[in-house]
Image (spheres, grey):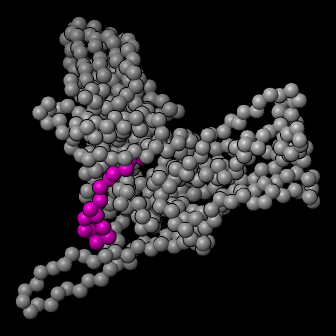
Amino acid sequence: MTGTIQDYAVIVNNVLKHIAPKVAATTRSEYLDFMTKIDDNQRIYTDVGVTGLGMAEIIPDGAVGASDAPIQGFSKNYVQMHFTKKVRMTFQTNFFLFESSAAKIKGDVKNKVLEGKNAIELAKNYLAQCLLAQGFGTSFTWVPISSVGLATPVSTLGADAVAYWSASHPREDGGPVWSNVIVDAVSSPQFTYSALLAARRQQSLKKDGRGMPLMSTLDTMVARSGSTTAQFAKTIKGTIDKGLAPQQVNLFNNAPATDTFNVVELSAFENQGLSGLMWGMFDSKLKTADYGFIYIEALATRSEPAVVDSLGNQDLVMNFNSLCQMGASDLRGWMWSAGNGTSTG
Amino acid sequence: MIQDASSRHISSAINAGPGDTVLIARNLTTPAWNYIHEIIGDLSAAGSMSIVAINSAAAERVLGTFNLADGQGLTLQDQSGQDNRPRFEFNPDENAVMRCVTGTFTGSLERSIRN
């Protein structure tokens, strides 16, 4: 929309006393809670995997050992996306709201309501959690929530060319496929103590590209802020932190069966973002440029100089831009559940 | 000790005649697991009563079948020590259905949701 003076009839009323901004107090870059930031100034960032060596062997005296070499893995291109926000106001709107000596909107309120950097961080936060929520498919169409702007197709394929959350991730050495979908009697269970134990059992069985143990432990849980899942995760975490098991099957055995964990809560964007039932866990030791989700930034969010549309109607135009991309190549460090008891990946 | 989390428990009456009666309908607009913590009641004529989960593709999971005598009462409750773990659990795509072959099951249901 373009802000014309008629859109602010109440604000420019000459007796108005107080103008209260209706925006979030702060916008935090919460995608960095589960993504690794990579600074890269090129338009295309390519990563390709390479395995280590297989296990060593034992030979008799004088025998010749078998030769081994690393195996080239899967590769993926990340092409920078352009996040932008444009603000447009007519000449009178800008003058009477912000510039006149009787300007209605004070500087600090102006900063809050015209903060395009927040708008861009919100888009990044939302896209990041959409990647988690939509990761059972191979792609989805991302639409900004405020219905200002275009729909954009987004891929949710890892470097191995299967969906982020899949029970059939191929292994570099051609070994058995592996899964990062949580199964606790049913696929994609809701979060419970039992599902936590199941996820950690599955993670312990993960292998590297040569079939060797990944030696990974899920230590961080992701859920939607304020959901029953997040609330219950805190109960379970608190109980484990006290040295107690969050269940009472046997009164003489009430020590927890697993270690504590951290909880990362992501804002409730809803729509294509996290539902209250979705949850997942990752190994923070595998939150690196090599494993897990990455955020590749070529241009941090910047405000362009405000310009007057001098060829047209003299509207004031402000632009905010960022060039970045986000996604994942190898999600061995993650386990995920749609929380619906049915998604199998 | 807590085993699972759910909403406040809600009680409602059961009056299930012969055939399938939906005790709790799926709500895919606001997906939630449905938990049944307790069923109390009796069957008006000798026959069998089943608790069945039926999903939107009409696939069934039979969670329990009980052969009851004429007027026989039945109480099904959560396992003690497993707080809030439901006696019967239904995923967000499933209807909770009571299936009576003969007679009418009359009683009470205590349920909650997890969303």
B65 vs A252, nearest the viewer: A252
- Residue beneath the point at 65% across and 59% down: A301
Q: Nearer the viewer, residue B44 or B87?
A: B87
Q: State the quadrant of the N terminus of chain A.
A: top right
Q: Which residue is at a point 44% across and 25% down the rendered structure image?
A: B25
- Specify the segment rendered in magenta: A207-222
Question: Does the rendering let one see residue A225?
Answer: yes
Q: Residue at x 20, y 85 (%)?
A: A66
Asked whether residue A160 is in view, the answer is no
Magenta stretch, overall SS? loop
Residue A88 picture location, percent across and down: 81, 49
**Relative to residue A79, is residue B16 depicted above or below?**
above
Q: Is residue A323 magenta?
A: no
State which quadrant residue A155 falls in. bottom right
Q: Is residue B76 above or below residue A23?
A: above
- Where is residue A114 shown, x and y percent of the image? 73, 46
